[in-house]
Image: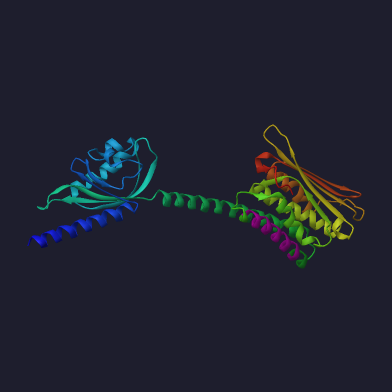
Amino acid sequence: MECERRRSIDELETTIERYELALRESNVMVFTQDRDLRYTSITNPLAGLGVDQIIGRTDADILAEESRNAAISLKRETLDTGSAQDCEIRVGFIGGAFRWFDLHIKPLRDLAGDTIGLIGTAVDITGRKDDEAHLRLLLRELTHRSKNLLTVIQAMARQTARHATSLEGFVAQFDARLQALATSHDVLVDEGWHGASLGELAGLHLQPFVDAAARQVSMAGPMVLLKPEAAQALGMALHELANNAKKFGALSVPDGRISITWVRVAQPDGDSVALKWTESGGPPVIAPAARRFGSVVIERNLERAVGGKVRLAFLSDGVQCDILIPAMFLVDFFDRGAI
């Protein structure tokens, strides 16, 4: 008899030891409270508190004033109704940060079935809540950017149609401009939509117009990250400059050259970037009698998008374009790794 009792006690102690070990290795806080909501036991205290800082105290002693009422009311309701409660609750600890918890509480009863307090579990879900908030932010940003993108595409379609002389010409030009827009977005996506490298942006937009072996394009400047609005507008402008150079300018002949340089420009509100596009070695330039879609994109749209200054000049020995992008549309400059 004594051996069986001893065996039962050993089995119970082993079970309890396994239970405590499992709890210690988890992120689940298990607690009990009496009817006055004083903590009588706790495993895995959260928010950096020790067991001795919690046992014998109430939620009013350890929770921040802004959040204690919600937790206390929930527990009082469980004591009054005898019903279990499940909820996600945001609470803060005195001297600590606010955290989100998945809380489950139920009445703690004695052998006679009377409610003598509460037993509950709490799991810290702050990380999940932060991820959910970030996802909502991204969805709102995606909606905003999608609307802006549709507006840009609508304007592009109207302007292209206005200057197109045939349906085939419209389709070809519109498709090329859509691809240029997609190229800028590819660069932004690769960088997590935080910014686009000016050098990479320029290289990708020139690539379709240049023979890789011809070495007709040179680029030089510090590493610059453009904000999405500036990257999108500058990408379209670079596409139109390259397209014009391919049809009429430096890229239309083997000996033509294009130089793209950019430098810092000190301004009272922070360093801006000045970009210069210079063509040489091409056919003599004849200034157009009227501004067409490409010129509108380069001058008006770019100025409107970035609030900077654009000067497009059809000089006899080659097209030149000077673009000043204000500091507010730049993410950062980096001194090392210049293009």
Quadrant where the image shows the N terminus = bottom left
- For image coordinates 39% across by 41% down, the residue present is 98
Q: Is residue 111 visible?
A: yes
Indicate whether 268 appears above or below 155.
above
The stretch drawn in magenta includes residue 73: no
Q: Residue drawn 88% across and 56% down?
A: 256
Question: What residue is at 70 percent from the left and 37 percent from the top?
Answer: 271
Chain part drawn in magenta: 171-188
Q: Check residue 174 for magenta coloring.
A: yes
Residue at the image position 15 percent from the left and 57 percent from the top: 9
Q: Tell me: residue 176, above or below residue 73.
A: below
Residue 69 at x, y percent in the picture? 29, 39
**Residue farthest to the left?**
1
Residue farthest top in this picture? 268
199 with respect to 67 (left or right): right
Tell me if residue 249 can be seen: no
The image's colour scheme reads: rainbow
Q: Main secondary structure of the magenta part?
A: helix
| Residue 198 locus on image (x, y percent) | 71, 49
Q: Residue furthest bottom?
A: 168
In screen coordinates, is 265 left or right of 52? right
Please provide percent x and percent y for residue 307. 70, 41
Question: Residue 319 vs residue 48: left or right?
Answer: right
How many numbered marks appear?
0
Q: Position of residue 23 (x, y in %)?
A: 30, 53
Seen from the viewer's position, the closer of residues 254 and 166 is 254
Tell me which corner region of the image, top left, top right, bottom left or bottom right, holds residue 155.
bottom right
